[in-house]
Image (tube, rainbow, N blue to C red):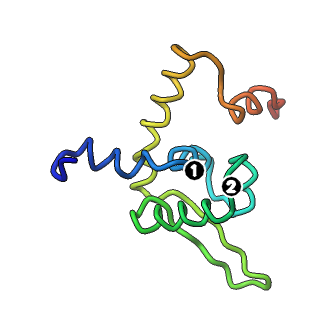
Amino acid sequence: MDPDCPVCRTAEIVCGKWTLLLVRDLAEGRSRFCELERSLAGISPRTLSLRLRALEEEGIVERHTYPEVPPRVEYALTEKGLALLPIVDGMRSYGEQWLGGACAADTQDAAAPVAA
């Protein structure tokens, strides 16, 4: 690994399991832990917690805690996190063109009725 290579440094961040799927889901806006856990079928709560913490430390995700009882915590992408969206979009386009299929979230959006 070349620490000066921007491709290597970016790959080190985004190639962690679940990372780009978290970015994809957070692209829709703020989400709570339980919402992310539901949308990422198969992720354990511990893994989700560790991934969110690592993304926070990288400045990709920010955590908002609301002073309520019980406490409410939401996660959102930072400007640095939003800058990863072209990578996710490129992967979506590549997958649709070369691998077939669509994301479950995209399929649900297409099936949802459009409000007038």
Q: Is residue 62 above or below residue 71?
A: above
Type of residue at label 1? Leu
**Residue tagged by mark 2?**
36
Point out residue 45 in the picture as x, y percentages from the top left corner: 68, 63
Q: CA distance from mark 1 to mark 2?
A: 7 Å
Badge 2: residue crowd in 10 Å (few <14, some 14–19, many ≥20): many
Badge 1: residue crowd in 10 Å (few <14, some 14–19, many ≥20): many
Determine contact: label 1, label 2, CB under 8 Å.
Answer: yes
- In the image, taking residue 9 as reference, residue 39 lies left or right, namely right
Q: Residue at x 73, y 81 (%)?
A: 71
Q: Residue at x 68, y 48 (%)?
A: 40
Most foreground residue, 43 or 79:
43
Lower position in the chain sequence, tag 1 or tag 2:
1
**Residue tagged by mark 1?**
22
Q: Residue at x 46, y 64 (%)?
A: 54
Where is the C terminus found, in terms of image quarters? top right
